Image: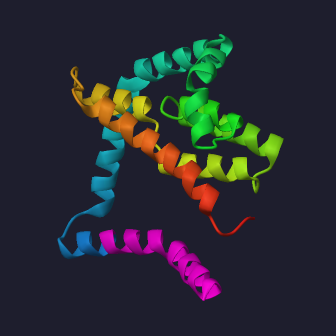
């Protein structure tokens, strides 16, 4: 039963994106949309947005560099340690949880460090992978998208996104503890 399910999931995952692209293309063709011209127009707009968000990206990268070079992670670990002990979170995962809302590439680098230290198939590696897949680079996304359209007041977006990230991180730890297949 489990191997049939895994085979079905594998086949579905291999064909999912090509089928979506084909469906969009066929839908556009039926609607008489000039797909290539629209694609090029969208690429031009994307390039303009990329130029507009460069200052926001530089600010985020500088903030991450300052945080990592300082001793802020040690202070943060001591503050959050009672909660991490409560849910049985390995200490190696905490820096990933802190960096993930700020930077995808920084979080990826920390995940690779966890893989090198503990192994990708370890409990720590499994949790790191789940956190990468179940959370978002909240501040990066908000800075990029809100900055691109000129939103100055984010209101409830930041707390809502951070709550979603925290829930994703806690769920990753708890689900990996009960996951039946150890790799």
Q: Picture coordinates of residue 101 (x, y %)?
A: 48, 33
Please name the residue shown 67% across and 13% down the image: 69
Residue 3: quadrant of the picture: bottom right
- Horizontally, is 7 left or right of 136 in the view? right
Q: Is residue 92 above or below residue 28?
A: above
Q: Is residue 74 magenta?
A: no
Q: Which residues are magenta?
A: 1-24
Q: Picture coordinates of residue 157 (x, y %)?
A: 27, 33
Q: Picture coordinates of residue 4 (x, y %)?
A: 60, 88
Q: Picture coordinates of residue 32 (x, y %)?
A: 18, 70
Please name the residue shown 32% across and 30% down the image: 158
> Could you tell me if residue 99 is visible in this image?
no
Please name the residue shown 48% across and 20% down the image: 60
Q: Is residue 85 above or below residue 119?
A: above
Q: Is residue 4 magenta?
A: yes
- Horizontally, is 12 left or right of 153 in the view? right
């Amino acid at each position: 039963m489990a191997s049939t399910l895994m085979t079905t999931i594998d086949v579905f995952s291999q064909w999912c994106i090509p089928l979506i692209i084909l469906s969009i293309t066929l839908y556009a063709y039926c609607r008489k949309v000039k797909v290539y011209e629209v694609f090029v127009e969208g690429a031009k707009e994307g390039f303009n947005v990329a130029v507009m968000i460069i200052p926001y990206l530089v600010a985020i990268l500088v903030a991450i560099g300052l945080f990592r070079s300082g001793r802020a992670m040690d202070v943060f670990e001591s503050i959050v340690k009672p909660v991490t002990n409560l849910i049985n979170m390995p200490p190696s995962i905490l820096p990933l949880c802190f960096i993930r809302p700020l930077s995808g590439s920084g979080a990826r680098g920390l995940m690779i460090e966890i893989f090198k230290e503990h192994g990708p198939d370890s409990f720590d590696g499994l949790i790191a992978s789940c956190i990468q897949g179940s959370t978002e680079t909240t501040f990066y996304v908000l800075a990029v998208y809100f900055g691109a359209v000129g939103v100055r007041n984010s209101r409830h977006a930041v707390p809502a996104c951070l709550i979603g990230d925290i829930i994703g991180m806690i769920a990753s730890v708890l689900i990996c503890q009960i996951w039946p297949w150890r790799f």
